[in-house]
Image (spheres, rainbow, N blue to C red):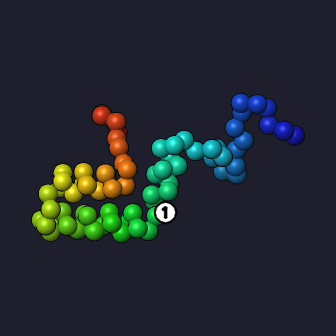
Amino acid sequence: MPTPPGRRQRRAGGLPDALGRAALAAEFLRRNRTYRAEHTQMQQSIADGAVAQKAAETAFARRWGLSFRHGAG
């Protein structure tokens, strides 16, 4: 039976087939080995005092094209 127009089909487990842009981007980064390695390296550099937290996070966000709305979270 075809799905009515404007209605999302659902996979097993009740998850929608189509993710929003933010969820898709987050899932891509979560699975990206290079992103995870660079994130860990950034955190270690901050912990070691080799770089200021704000500067490291800003550079990391710029490199990976991350942006956050003011007040989000």
Tell which of 36 and 55 is nearer to you: 55
Position above or below: 23 against 37: above
Quick check: can you spot residue 14?
Answer: no
Tell which of 62 and 33 is nearer to you: 62
User: Quarter of the image containing the C terminus?
Assistant: top left
Residue, x 40% and y 68% (percent of image)?
Answer: 34
Tell me which amino acid carries mark 1: Arg
- Picture coordinates of residue 11, whole percent (x, y): 70, 49
Residue, x 50% and y 46% (percent of image)?
Answer: 23
Quick check: can you spot residue 7?
Answer: yes
- Picture coordinates of residue 70, whole percent (x, y): 30, 34
Tag 1 residue: 31
Residue, x 51% and y 43% (percent of image)?
Answer: 21
- Residue reaching furthest to the right: 1
User: Is 26 on the left or on the right of 20, as rendered?
Assistant: left
> Judging from the image, what secondary structure is the residue with disc 1 in?
helix
Residue, x 35% and y 43% (percent of image)?
Answer: 67
Q: Within the image, what quadrant is residue 55 found in?
A: bottom left
- Picture coordinates of residue 56, whole percent (x, y): 21, 57
User: Is 62 on the left or on the right of 52, as rendered?
Assistant: right
- Residue reaching furthest to the left: 49
